[in-house]
Image: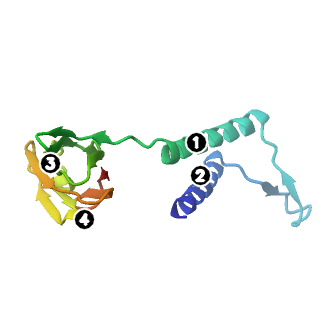
Amino acid sequence: MLHRRQMWGTLASLGIAIGIASGVQAAEPVAASNSTTQFRSIEQPLGLKVGVTLGGLTLIGLELWWFLFSKTKGQQAESIQGIQELTITVDGGYEPASVVVKAGQLVRLNFLRRDPNSCLEKVLLPDFHIVRELPLNQVTAVEFTPEKPGRYLFTCGMNMFRGVVEVQK
């Protein structure tokens, strides 16, 4: 439900922004000497109308694709001697931001922080009660064993950058 509200709100904002950016006014009052209750329409060139319409439809299409269809697949962790291991690069976010692991096996996520942004100094896995400092240009291992299938979020210290651990059977 929240996604629908966000989508409709974004579409309404986009329509308002396009209207403001194009400087189009629906009507302009006629000179005061004629009558103050009369309006005359302002005729816009057909090319401008078509261009604004196509631009708006293109932006709407891109937005729908981005939020509904551009979901990236999670990267499967490699199992080495019974430990599921994957390296996550921390540089303006998490790469990969989606990790797929199996339930009931030890998981080791190796975070390599390249970004000096203070927001990315920590990684939090709240469902596993884990908080780790991530020193710059060093690998920090985070180990846990997910027992149940599901999607478990990991975030930076300020909850601005996010990733997900998808646990499967």
The numbered dot on residue 108 is: 3
Q: Secondary structure at mark 2?
A: helix
Residue picked out by circle 4: 127
Give the image quarter of residue 112: top left
**Which is closer to the viewer, label 1 or label 4?**
4
Mark 1 vs mark 4, CA separation in Å: 37 Å
Which three-letter amino acid code belongs to the residue tagged 3?
A: Arg
Q: State yes or no: discs 1 and 4 in contact (Cβ < 8 Å).
A: no
Residue picked out by circle 2: 14
Which three-letter amino acid code belongs to the residue tagged 2?
A: Leu
- On the image, the x and y values in percent for residue 12 come to 62, 57
Which three-letter amino acid code belongs to the residue tagged 4?
A: Asp
Which three-letter amino acid code belongs to the residue tagged 1?
A: Leu
Q: State yes or no: discs 3 and 1 in contact (Cβ < 8 Å).
A: no
Disc 4 residue crowd, few under 14, some 14–19, many 20+, Cα 10 Å: few
Mark 2 vs mark 1, CA separation in Å: 9 Å
Mark 2 vs mark 3, CA separation in Å: 43 Å
Residue at x 19%, y 41% (from the top left corner): 86
**Which is closer to the viewer, label 4 or label 2?**
4
Front-most of 136 and 164? 164
Residue picked out by circle 1: 59
Q: State yes or no: discs 2 and 1 in contact (Cβ < 8 Å).
A: yes
Is residue 13 visible in the rendered image? The answer is yes
